[in-house]
Amino acid sequence: MPELPEVETIRRELDAAIVGRRITAVTIVDAKLILGKGAQAFGAALRGARVADTDRRGKLLILATDRGTLVLHLMMTGRISLRHSPAVRPHTRLVLEFDQGPSLHFVDTRRFGRAWMTDQAGLAALTRRMGPEPLDSAFTAARLAAGLRGRAVAIKPALLDQRAVAGVGNIYADEALWLARIHPATPAGSLGRHKVEALARAIVTVLRDGVAHGGTSFRTYENSRGEQGAHQRWLKVFRRTGEPCFRCGRPIERTIVGQRSTHSCPRCQRVYVRP
DNA sequence: CATTGGACCTGACCGC
DNA sequence: TGCGGTCAGGTCCAAT
């Protein structure tokens, strides 16, 4: 479910709510959630740890503690819920209780989400294979071009695989490609300099707007207080199949690109024709 | 190495 | 109401 704007929204809330708190209890409801040395070691490492800082890299939510770094990936349906009761509810996979304030619940219907402990070296190794952070100044058209160069795969799956740029998922990929007027099936390496520049700008725009609106909510996403995001009201193509393009009025099309549902305008986003 | 297709899970929704 | 099929905001892994 969550892409960069949704994870960033949650990170900001956690930063205000749990930094400085000490973890007093760790309840692992579903051991499948935990990667690494096992649920036992995970609980032992976190019990008594104090949350020092929050961070995010792409879609990874990172909680630094004085006993190691906790990494959470929400995948498709993961949610973080801050609740005053530590009581386990349907689909709760993990609960962290603190010395004061609400408990952190990792809730995940489909059980794809993961949590694990790591250290600075582990985090660096993980992060090294990811592309630049799109909302940092290090993200430039030149960096994006370098990540796309020589690639025959369609631009849409190239955006989703996290190597050219981190944090983009199915919603914001469609939105950015519409904004940059690029057909999602265009071979990534065939984009000219101007198109890559437009795409880099579009990625920044759609992600920044997504964060400003507290993320996009369809069915499963909600923030840590259980509230919906608002960005679904600003979407230009995603899940607007058959509705008029905001630029030209033609009906938005739904196709499959890279095995993912894809939305685009047949007039504004020209089908690529190999020269 | 790059790319593709299936696997991983559960629930909502739709048509019959 | 029940049943079967499709779809879902992500990633990993094996096969090619």
Image (cartoon, coloured by chain):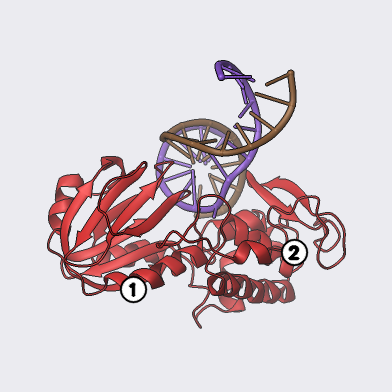
Chain colours: A red, B brown, C purple
- The kind of residue tagged 2 is Ile
Judge from the rendering whether residue A86 lies leftward or rightward of residue C2; answer left or right. left
The residue at 67%/67% (across/down) is A234
Residue A74 appearing in the image? no
Residue A262 position in % (x across, y down): 69, 51
- The kind of residue tagged 1 is Asp
For residue A127, which quarter of the picture? bottom left
Q: As rendered, which of A129 and A8 lies closer to the eye?
A: A8
Residue A56 position in % (x across, y down): 39, 69
Residue A185 position in % (x across, y down): 72, 54
Q: Which residue is mark 1?
A: A15
Chain under numbered label 2 = A
Q: As rendered, which of A155 and A27 lies closer to the eye?
A: A27
Q: As rendered, which of A134 and A83 lies closer to the eye?
A: A83
Residue A52 position in % (x across, y down): 23, 74
Chain under numbered label 1 = A
Q: Which quarter of the rendered picture does the C terminus of chain A lie within?
A: bottom right
Q: Which circle marks residue A182 in the picture? A: 2
**Which SS class for mark 1?**
helix
The residue at 58%/71% (across/down) is A144
The residue at 26%/48% (across/down) is A87
Share a chain, discs 1 and 2? yes
The residue at 35%/71% (across/down) is A55
In the image, residue A164 above or below residue A154 = below
Q: CA distance from mark 1 to mark 2?
A: 37 Å
Judge from the rendering whether residue A135 lies leftward or rightward of residue A117; answer left or right. right
**Which SS class for mark 2?**
loop
State how many labels appear. Answer: 2
- Which of the marked residues, 1 or 2, is nearer the chain's N terminus? 1
Judge from the rendering whether residue A231 lies leftward or rightward of residue A100; answer left or right. right
